[in-house]
Amino acid sequence: MNNQEVAVGVEVGDVVGRPVDMFQARARVDGSLNFAVNAELPNMVFARLLRSPVAHARILSVDTSAAQAMDGVVAVLTAADFERKGAPHRHFGPVLQDQPVLCGSKVRFAGDPVAAVAAETEEIAEAALLAIDVEYDELPVVAELDDALADGAALVHDRPPEPRGRVYPDINLVGREGNICTKFQLRKGDLEAGFAQADHIVESVYESPAVQHVPMEPHVVLASFEGKRLTVTTGTQTPTPCVTRSPRCSGCRRRPCASSSRPWAGATGPRPTPRSSR
């Protein structure tokens, strides 16, 4: 190969064989890159979620009357709005659809969403959340693994949901009971032969803590209608699930849906579906 050739079919001057700046690197550093969190639309309203302050409780009542009466509040939603005929599905999830959009009879962790407010400004939306009165009947909390697995442990899910939609081919669901979400077996090769040939065999129990990826940009979603077309703008690494799952929870199952993915500030797995941090 002479000095005028870099590779077959690639001419000198192409990116192959040359140092190239990372895509959007300069814009990320100087702050000019437009993330989804910066997106705005004319006459847009702002949504906020009221989240549970307790880890495990029955919801006895939700009073939104004071919030609904506030100037600038456009809408207040609770689980009851998902129970009417033709309403959107209230639960979602990639394999087990066990996460409610808004909790109805029970909250299962501190931060579970109970109500949603849409208002003309962020400040009004935040104030409206404070005006919502929720009465809880607290239940026993299972905060440790051994407590959750113990006989007679308080159940986080009274009736575990059945898996729907995507099931990963390398995970064999072989049973669920109590607080166990699922059991699966992963086997590769001849285990007995491997143990027989091993110089050392180590048996132990290994635990890993819950992980939060903590990307620079918070989770944010901007939804808009153009006629009957729903467009969801978010910072996501997988736009397709936004198109397939958003209509299910928005009541737009028979309407066209599009997903617009903005640049995102960090994604190592936490951005497959639309969600909000607030």
Image (tube, helix red, strand yellow):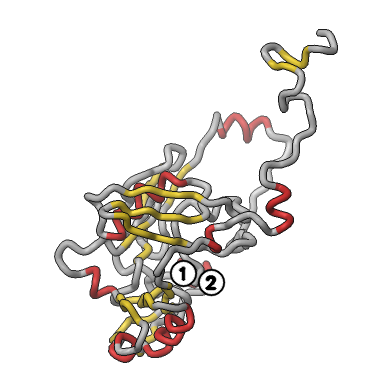
Q: Viewer-proximal residue, 194 or 142?
A: 142
- Taking the view exactly as shown, the residue that stands out farthest to the left is 85
Q: Viewer-proximal residue, 186 or 194?
A: 186
Q: Is residue 134 at all visible to an observer of this figure?
A: no
Amino acid at pointer 1:
Ala
Please report the residue visible at 49 percent of the width from the left and 72 percent of the height from the top: 278
Up the image or down, 272 lies above or below 278; here it is: above
- Badge 2 marks a residue whose secondary structure is loop
Up the image or down, 251 lies above or below 54; here it is: above
Is label 1 in contact with label 2 (beta carbons under 8 Å)? yes
Q: Is residue 230 at all visible to an observer of this figure?
A: yes
- Taking the view exactly as shown, the residue that stands out farthest to the top is 1
Neighbourhood count class around disc 1 (C-alpha, 10 Å): few under 14, some 14–19, many 20 upward: some
Residue 5 screen position, x and y as percent: 78, 12
Residue pointed to by mark 1 = 148
- Quarter of the picture containing the N terminus is top right
Please report the residue visible at 41 percent of the width from the left and 84 percent of the height from the top: 129
- Badge 1 marks a residue whose secondary structure is helix
- Taking the view exactly as shown, the residue that stands out farthest to the right is 3
Residue 160 screen position, x and y as percent: 32, 61
Q: Is 230 displayed left or right of 150 in the figure? A: left
Up the image or down, 125 lies above or below 28; here it is: below
Residue pointed to by mark 2 = 144
Q: Viewer-proximal residue, 78 or 137?
A: 78
Please report the residue visible at 69 percent of the width from the left and 34 percent of the height from the top: 198
Q: Viewer-proximal residue, 188 or 91?
A: 91
Q: Quadrant of residue 97?
A: bottom left
Residue 262 screen position, x and y as percent: 53, 51
Neighbourhood count class around disc 2 (C-alpha, 10 Å): few under 14, some 14–19, many 20 upward: few
Q: Is 89 displayed left or right of 51 in the figure? A: left
- What label sits on residue 10 in the rendered view? none
- Taking the view exactly as shown, the residue that stands out farthest to the front is 42
